[in-house]
Amino acid sequence: MKTFAIIALVGVASLALYSMAPSVESGVETQFQEFLATYGQNYGTTEEYNYRLGVFKANLESIAEMNKEEGVEFGVNEFADQTPQEFAVRFGFKQPVGTKKSTATHIKAVEGENINWSDMWTDVKNQGACGSCWAFSAAAAFESRYQLAHGETNTDKLYSEQELVDCEPQSDGCEGGLMDFAFEYLIDSAFCTEQQYPYTARDESCKVTKCAGGPNDAGFTDVPEKDEQALVDELMSGPVAVAVDASRWQFYRKGIFSTCNDNLNHGVTLVAVNFDEESLTIRNSWGKSWGENGHIRLALNKNTCGVAEAASVPTF
Ligand SMILES: *[C@@H]1O[C@H](CO)[C@@H](O)[C@H](O)[C@H]1NC(C)=O
């Protein structure tokens, strides 16, 4: 990989000279070479290289198109050589029809008072190419609310998404699942820490017995559907597991995102509301180089990306 990066850098240098000629194609390939060097990406064959260059070019075009929108910015990131279809393996939020609901406690938010829980973690996590977003969403809500229930406001106690992927029986591991199923599973099953049960981004067999003595929850409450005020109210007591339509998020870089459908396909965590700039902040699980240090801001009061449609919290 290192050798390749050096070769790629030399390639970038020579291509940079070459691209003095005003050719759009070589300009794209220069950017592609820069992308490969930055992310240490490498392909086995010339066919694969050419195919990925084509994908990269198509992505540059959709990034340029999306950047016509004001107030939000999209750009090349580590996912720039993946087609939208390939990227979509991460979208593992699957809500079965007729899933049972429970009602939320409704704590009235103080009008105009901002809240921001993002500092409860030192880093965002990375689900990799596995549809385990639901497990990351559930673990983040559990980690933060468990700490808050015990009077602590920062959490370096991180829990195991892999346990949920391997052991939670109603969800489908890397093929998708539901945060409420995870909270239900954690009523009777001790939650392992990440160290005890590390993340592999693959479906594996359940190895949970070694974590006896870990914490449980008491179940979950669902926030009333399409009621963004209730969602913000729920945020006052801690982060909230939410489902969103993340179909247009692949190249998000910064700003307040607002153009979205609501075909829920991704589980994430709501961590902040800011009434001055009218935003909700979402903590994602695609690493910290994506978006704003791993987060995305959504326009407030518009049910942006369906954020208020399937929100819930674990109870203790
Ligand atoms: C929340 O806190 C983080 C970390 O301190 C900060 O970077 C971010 O801008 C804050 N978000 C809002 C919406 O105020």
Image (tube, grey):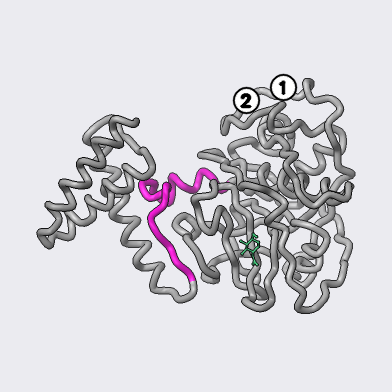
Rounded to the nearest whole Å, what is the CA distance between mark 2 and mark 1?
Answer: 9 Å
Q: Residue furthest left?
A: 21
Can the viewer see residue 294 in this picture? Answer: yes
Q: Is residue 257 left or right of residue 236?
A: left
Q: Which residue is mark 1?
A: 207
Can the viewer see residue 180 in this picture? Answer: no
Give residue 132's quadrant in the image: top right
Number of the label disc, if any, that sits on residue 316? none
x, y percentage for residue 152? 83, 49
Contact, mark 2 vs mark 1 (Cβ under 8 Å): yes
Span colored in magenta: 72-91
In percent of the image, x 60 and y 29: which residue is there? 203
Give residue 191's quadrant in the image: top right
Mark 1: which amino acid? Answer: Lys
- Does label 2 point to a residue whose CB lies under 8 Å from ligand 1? no
Callout 2 secondary element:
loop
In percent of the image, x 60 and y 52: which residue is there? 284
Give residue 236's quadrant in the image: bottom right
Number of the label disc, if any, that sits on residue 204? 2
Q: Is residue 218 magenta?
A: no
x, y percentage for residue 178? 70, 46
x, y percentage for residue 223? 80, 61
Question: Relative to 240, is 204 above or below?
Answer: above
Question: Relative to 111, is 217 above or below?
Answer: above
Callout 1 secondary element:
loop
Mark 2: which amino acid? Answer: Glu
